[in-house]
Image (cartoon, coloured by chain):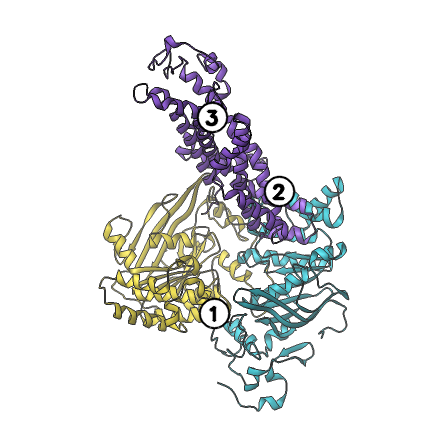
Chain colours: A cyan, B purple, C yellow
């Protein structure tokens, strides 16, 4: 299930499931998804709220184990909480969160914040530690004087740079970025995005970039995948994804983005009306999770969940419309 | 705020200055602080300030008994001829000492248990500690303290122990809820993911963010503890005579109302002043540590 | 596309407004020389990044500025011809009655302990012409239907926590409808909503405003939303106006370097890559730059930009830009 057969896969996810038990019932956050990220690739995982994309990221970094399926990192099974992972593994997979303000301890200086991963992952002490801290700050483009400051004294973009530095300090090979720029202004988003790209190139990192911002993904990632209500519905190289979206949800999402110029309007699929609300993940619709809002819903969609098929090289879709031609002739449902 | 390269960076001092400004801009908090500082000075230097320090011990001078407030005796004299003002100062010292001792015993125990229970949430450790805490909270503090003192022997030390035993559960509860909510913070989760040891997480990540509410509570508690200590003295189970204690001064003096009103009234006013001072400071602290919003 | 009533004065006329905040660190001079105008039946956009003062401006208009620490230093606000800063009871009443505000976080605007029915009937009970209970019910249901609320009956009996974000925002809009205001201030109404829901809410707002001939101010940092929903746009930077004009003009030919930089930094659906962003940060309001507030970051700054604040230059068709680069090119009076 890869799109780039020539490169080695640094991360392979198969049939991944995650459920949470709430008072209202069983919440299926991730309902069996498959995808793979090649080494040195930037992979974008897109979805709205309730799509389960953050849960996927959480499982990869080890916040909790899955309820089914497999996560392979460099061929090794890593599906367990971080506490049970080897030290080396913990070092290799790092995380950048969305809210830079909340992810930095307001009672610690930047120096203390950056020292922690260096101590834990690279066993540095004393002057070696000092030097590594300074190198990290330098790498993300912040002045050394920032080391003695507290997080409240620096701006949002700079806080995020500290978070990125914290993720890079252990010399990882894979970083999960969960909405790293969503809380920032547009002009700062651009700077952070640039920094991320530059670092990725220089250090040969692989990124899993999780966001709901399609325009950002369009310009930043190499492959794009879209999730809805815990399922992965389409994945393709970014250019292909945006110029030839196949899944109705992808089309609906693209058609809904408010864009700034006529030029961009041309890139939006012809109006697929956005209707309805996202159903509750506790009471999932039967069959295909999207059928309640899908303008092309067939009878089959109500009963049977579609499977991922490769429609063209590297472009996979999970939709009954794109599987059998027989199905296409079936009657539409209301 | 953008980085001013010219200023030397002294983040802790700047933070303190700003907190002080916020605290002092509230007149009542400032008043409370002045009252508390004055009282502490009076208590510490009671021996030097009191006009008749020897009256704090055994002293009898029936000729000077029950004298109204005058220039010689600012608060008058009691039935034994002792200068009430001097006794008040020493009684104040006793009250503050009890308050500090109770907090010194009760807070570390309470906070420690709260930290442990909160960090090991949803395990048997959590349940056993918290239910144990509930047991102690089921009894009203004054009653519990009295029981302890009655079982041991009345006096300063056991009164403090008694109150401390009644007091620590509230700190456990407070710390527990603080730890529980702080554990959801991203930076704590990050430390856990990175494999930081529990000791580091509790002491370096969680505790520094929990101290503010704890300190606020301590200040507000001082007043309450002093009242309880005074109540215990009032019923004779606190500090024993002839050592002065504000509570016993009030209880002994009540029978002299309304003629020799100064005998209970001045000590009582002192208690009010102490409690008010600490409460105002505590309120001020709470405002300072509250999340700023603009 | 503006609905100009030629002889009437503007519905809302803000002139030379200056607002400051007094803090421990000093006085923040946020808004200065703000001119802002909304005609009857017009939809006006207000664009700018976080901290540029757009919320302050709206709050000043709606008279909900926290005074102190805020203070209106100078300027005038005329609503329906009346000076609302004159502290008269009638002015307050006018503002309360005819202006309504929709905030970014619908959860924060709705009291969690009251049912939707209570909110809505309270508005009706305090209306200039109170009606009977049954009539109120009819009006509430009608308002909910106008905002395409699914199962309105159930929603009336619900508490805000039981509704989704999109539904809560619809409730807020319905409440504005009930109140029958003349001016709707929408402060980032869709920022916390998913893209597909955002589109529905924006469309809804548009229809309601246009159909009922109301006026609307849409504040958003989502440029696409402003472009599709407004007739005129103001661009703000650090408490100053950078540019204003017909929306199409401003978006197709931005004149101010900040506007140009902002548009360029926004990731495009057409896939033009990641821009460099705008170097620097927004200035401190404590000690703002003496001249143009954007000068420290402006790639085309000249000597005069650092010394004197630019005056407005009319580039034709009421496209006004506050920039020394254009000062020589004015077509008539500024």
- The image's mark for residue A109 is 2
Q: Which quadrant holds the N terminus of chain C?
A: bottom left
Q: Is residue B248 left or right of residue B195?
A: left
Q: Are marks 3 and 1 in contact (CB under 8 Å)?
A: no
Mark 1 and mark 2 in contact (Cβ < 8 Å)?
Answer: no
Other residues around mark 2 within 10 Å, as few (<14) / some (14–19) / many (≥20): many
| SS class, disc 2 | loop
Q: Are marks 2 and 1 on the same chain?
A: no
User: Which residue carries the number 1 mark?
Assistant: C197
Mark 2, chain letter?
Answer: A
**Image position of A175 (left or right of B65):** right
Which residue matches tag 3?
B37
Q: Name the residue at 38% across, 72% down.
A: C152
Please tell me whether residue A307 is drawn above or below residue C57 in the rendered image: below
**Residue A178 has which mark?**
none
Camera-nearest residue between C24 and B229: B229
Taking depth in this image into account, of A62 and B77 the one nearest to the observer is: B77
Q: Residue at the left extreme?
A: C129
Q: Which residue is rendered at x = 63% and y = 47% of the image?
A: A142
Q: Is residue A18 visible?
A: yes
- Read off the chain for label 1: C
Q: C57 and B225: which one is in front?
A: B225
Rendering coords of residue C252 (x, y %): 47, 66
Q: In the image, which is nearer the foreground, mark 3 or mark 1?
A: 3
In terms of secondary structure, where does tag 3 sit?
helix
Q: CA distance from mark 3 to mark 1?
A: 59 Å
In this rendering, the label closer to the viewer, 3 or 2: 3
Q: Position of residue B237 (x, y in %)?
A: 48, 28
């Amino acid at each position: 299930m890869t799109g780039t057969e020539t490169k080695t896969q640094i991360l392979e996810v198969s049939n991944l499931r995650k459920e949470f038990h709430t008072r209202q019932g069983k919440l299926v956050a991730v309902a069996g998804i498959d995808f793979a990220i090649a080494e040195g690739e930037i992979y974008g995982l897109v979805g709205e709220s309730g799509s389960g994309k953050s849960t996927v990221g959480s499982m990869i970094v080890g916040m909790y184990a899955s309820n089914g399926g497999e996560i392979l990192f460099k061929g090794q099974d890593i599906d367990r909480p971080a506490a049970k992972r080897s030290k080396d593994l913990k070092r290799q997979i790092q995380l950048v969160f969305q809210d830079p303000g909340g992810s930095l301890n307001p009672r610690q200086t930047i120096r203390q914040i950056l020292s922690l991963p260096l101590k834990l992952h690279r066993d540095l002490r004393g002057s070696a530690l000092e030097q590594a801290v300074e190198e990290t700050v330098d790498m993300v483009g912040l002045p050394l004087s920032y080391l003695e400051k507290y997080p409240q004294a620096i701006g949002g973009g700079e806080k995020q740079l500290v978070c990125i530095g914290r993720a890079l300090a252990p010399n990882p090979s894979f970083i999960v970025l969960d909405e790293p720029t969503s809380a920032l202004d547009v002009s700062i988003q651009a700077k952070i995005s640039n920094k991320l790209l530059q670092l990725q190139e220089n250090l040969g990192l692989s990124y899993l970039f999780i966001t709901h911002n399609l325009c950002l993904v369009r310009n930043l990632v190499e492959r794009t995948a879209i999730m809805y209500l815990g399922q992965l519905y389409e994945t393709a190289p970014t250019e292909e994804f945006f110029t030839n979206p196949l899944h109705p949800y992808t089309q609906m999402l693209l058609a809904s983005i408010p864009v700034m110029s006529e030029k961009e309007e041309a890139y939006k699929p012809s109006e697929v009306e956005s209707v309805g609300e996202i159903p509750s993940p506790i009471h999932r619709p039967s069959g295909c999770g999207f059928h309640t809002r899908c303008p092309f819903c067939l009878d089959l969609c109500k009963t049977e969940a579609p499977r991922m098929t490769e429609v063209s090289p590297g472009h996979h879709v999970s939709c009954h419309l794109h599987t059998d031609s027989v199905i296409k002739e079936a009657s539409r449902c209301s | 705020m953008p980085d001013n390269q010219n200023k030397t960076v002294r983040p802790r001092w700047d933070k303190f200055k700003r907190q002080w400004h916020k605290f002092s801009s509230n007149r009542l908090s400032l008043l409370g602080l002045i009252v508390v500082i004055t009282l502490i000075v009076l208590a510490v230097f009671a021996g030097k300030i009191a006009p008749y320090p020897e009256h704090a011990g055994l002293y009898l001078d029936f000729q000077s008994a029950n004298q109204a407030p005058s220039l010689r005796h600012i608060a008058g004299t009691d039935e034994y001829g002792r200068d009430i003002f001097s006794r008040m100062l020493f009684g104040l010292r006793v009250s503050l000492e009890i308050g500090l001792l109770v907090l010194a015993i009760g807070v570390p125990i309470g906070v420690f248990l709260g930290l442990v229970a909160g960090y090991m949430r949803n395990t048997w450790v959590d349940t056993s500690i918290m239910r144990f805490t509930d047991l102690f909270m089921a009894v009203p503090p004054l009653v519990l303290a009295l029981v302890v003192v009655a079982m041991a022997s009345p006096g300063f030390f056991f009164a403090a122990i008694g109150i401390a035993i009644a007091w620590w559960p509230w700190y456990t509860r407070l710390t527990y809820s603080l730890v529980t909510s702080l554990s959801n913070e991203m930076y704590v989760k990050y430390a856990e993911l990175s494999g930081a040891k529990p000791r580091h997480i509790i002491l370096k990540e969680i505790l520094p963010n929990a101290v503010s509410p704890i300190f606020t509570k301590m200040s507000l508690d001082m007043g309450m503890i002093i009242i309880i200590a005074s109540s215990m003295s009032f019923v004779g189970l606190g500090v024993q005579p002839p050592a002065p204690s504000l509570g016993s001064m009030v209880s002994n003096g009540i029978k002299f109302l309304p003629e020799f009103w100064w005998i209970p009234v001045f000590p009582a006013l002192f208690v009010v002043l102490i409690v008010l001072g600490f409460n105002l400071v505590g309120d001020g602290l709470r405002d300072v540590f509250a999340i700023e919003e603009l | 596309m503006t609905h100009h009533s030629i002889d009437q004065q503007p519905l809302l006329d803000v002139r030379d407004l200056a607002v400051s905040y007094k803090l421990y660190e000093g006085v923040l001079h946020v808004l200065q020389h703000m001119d802002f105008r909304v005609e009857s039946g017009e939809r006006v956009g207000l664009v700018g990044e976080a901290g540029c003062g757009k919320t302050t401006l709206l709050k000043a208009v709606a008279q909900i500025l926290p005074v102190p620490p805020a203070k209106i230093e100078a300027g005038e606000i005329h609503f329906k011809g009346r000076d609302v800063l004159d502290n008269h009871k009638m002015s307050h009443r006018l503002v309360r009655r005819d202006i309504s505000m929709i905030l970014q976080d619908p959860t924060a605007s709705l009291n969690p302990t009251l049912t939707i029915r209570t909110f809505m009937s309270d508005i009706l009970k305090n209306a200039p012409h109170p009606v009977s209970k049954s009539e109120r019910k009819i009006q509430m249901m009608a308002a909910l239907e106008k905002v395409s609320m699914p199962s309105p009956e159930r929603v009336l009996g619900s508490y805000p926590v039981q509704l989704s974000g999109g539904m809560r925002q619809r409730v807020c809009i319905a409440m504005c409808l009930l109140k029958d205001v003349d001016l709707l201030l929408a402060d980032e109404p869709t920022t916390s909503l998913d893209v597909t829901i955002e589109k529905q809410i924006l469309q809804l707002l548009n229809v309601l405003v246009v159909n009922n001939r109301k006026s609307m101010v849409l504040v958003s940092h989502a440029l696409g939303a402003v472009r599709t929903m407004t007739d005129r746009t103001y661009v703000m930077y650090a408490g100053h106006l950078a540019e204003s004009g017909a929306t199409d003009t401003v978006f197709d030919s931005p004149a101010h370097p900040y506007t140009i930089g902002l548009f360029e930094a926004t990731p495009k659906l057409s896939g033009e890559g990641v821009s460099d962003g705008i170097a620097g940060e927004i200035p401190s309001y404590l000690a703002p730059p003496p001249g143009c507030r954007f000068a420290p970051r402006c790639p085309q700054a000249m000597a005069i930009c650092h010394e004197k604040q630019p005056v407005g230059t009319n580039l034709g068709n009421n496209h006004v830009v506050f920039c020394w680069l254009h000062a020589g090119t004015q077509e008539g009076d500024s």
